[in-house]
Image (cartoon, rainbow, N blue to C red):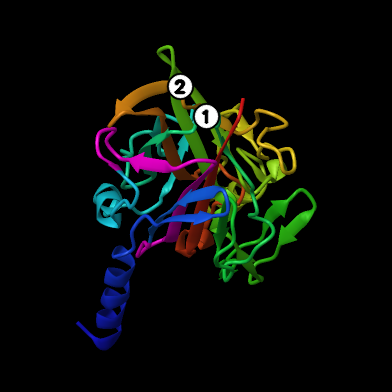
Amino acid sequence: MNRMEDIMKKIIISFLTLVLLFMSLGTATYAWITMARTNIIDEITIYATLGADLEISLDGENYYSELPASLLYENIEKSCLLEVTTLDGINFHHREEDVRVEKNRDYLSFDFYIRTDSIREHEVYLANNISNEISYEDVGKEGTYIISRGVKFKSPITFLYDIDDIVEAGEIRTYYASKAVRISTITEVDGEKRVKVFDLSGDEHRGYAKPYGATSYFNTRFNTELVLPEEGPKTFYKLSEFEEDAPFALDDTSHILSLTETMEVDGKTYYYGKVTVNIWLEGWDADLFDSVLKDRIKIQLQFKAVRK
């Protein structure tokens, strides 16, 4: 092992010692899950903002105020985001149907059980998308985001990047994998799965199965003609807004979970629920072609609980 490999190993080990930090700011409680990845994902942070104490579990039995990162790492240690696709946010496959896709190898999937002893704040939202307001170097920003470092790529061919934008052969541009990432949240209500798919880039024009961008690049480079899907999963390009200085949402766009079940622990009543979060590179996104597969991504999700 050379000196650079030894340094990288020490950095990775130091990242893996990070744990779920439980910290209070005013009346809010933040639960953090931070992981470093050695491939395309540099960092994942997931936190919840509630008006009362929050505990998180990976199995629905063992709850922690400080969740060891090693527990999360066990689920994703072999993960490396690859280009996959889905019609429902639940079932994933490669664009080539015969290529097997495996959870927590080719895309990320987490089950989180959340509980609180608050008697009012039970409606959980994905909140505060700041993806287009910060850069890859920004750290410590509160909010939801998917950002990437970007990759400078010299195109080997001329292709149609957008309706009125042509990339010439030999032209160098910077491309971003973050624009092709999707998130789905899955909950179950009365035996029925409720799914929401989010594109935090906010750019529907460069969303699912467009004839330009990645499709034009692929068709031109390999002298073929892809058959585009007629429709994809319903996707939300913005998150809910909230009343200023009030614990209420103005809309249900990014409402993902209601903490409706109850449990008694040591004489205290907890309200709890479960949400599955999937994260993937959408294989039919207009921004997913050769260059971005070498990009580095940072993901942070903020879940906010408010009153109904």
Say which of 290 and 306 sits in front: 306
Near-viewer residue (133 or 206): 133
Q: Residue at x 59, y 61 (%)?
A: 141
Residue 166: give x, y in percent of width and height.
74, 58
- With respect to residue 106, does 120 lie above or below? above
- Is 306 or 205 nearer to us in this picture? 306
* The C terminus: image quadrant: top right
| Residue behind mark 1 | 122
Q: Quadrant of residue 18?
A: bottom left
Q: Quadrant of residue 240?
A: top right
Q: Position of residue 147 (x, y in %)?
A: 57, 59
Number of residue marks? 2
Q: Amino acid at mark 2?
A: Thr
Which residue: 59% across, 52% down?
143
**Range shown magenta:** 36-63
The answer to whether the residue labelled 2 contacts the one labelled 1, judged by CB atoms less than 8 Å apart, is yes
| Residue 260, disc | 2
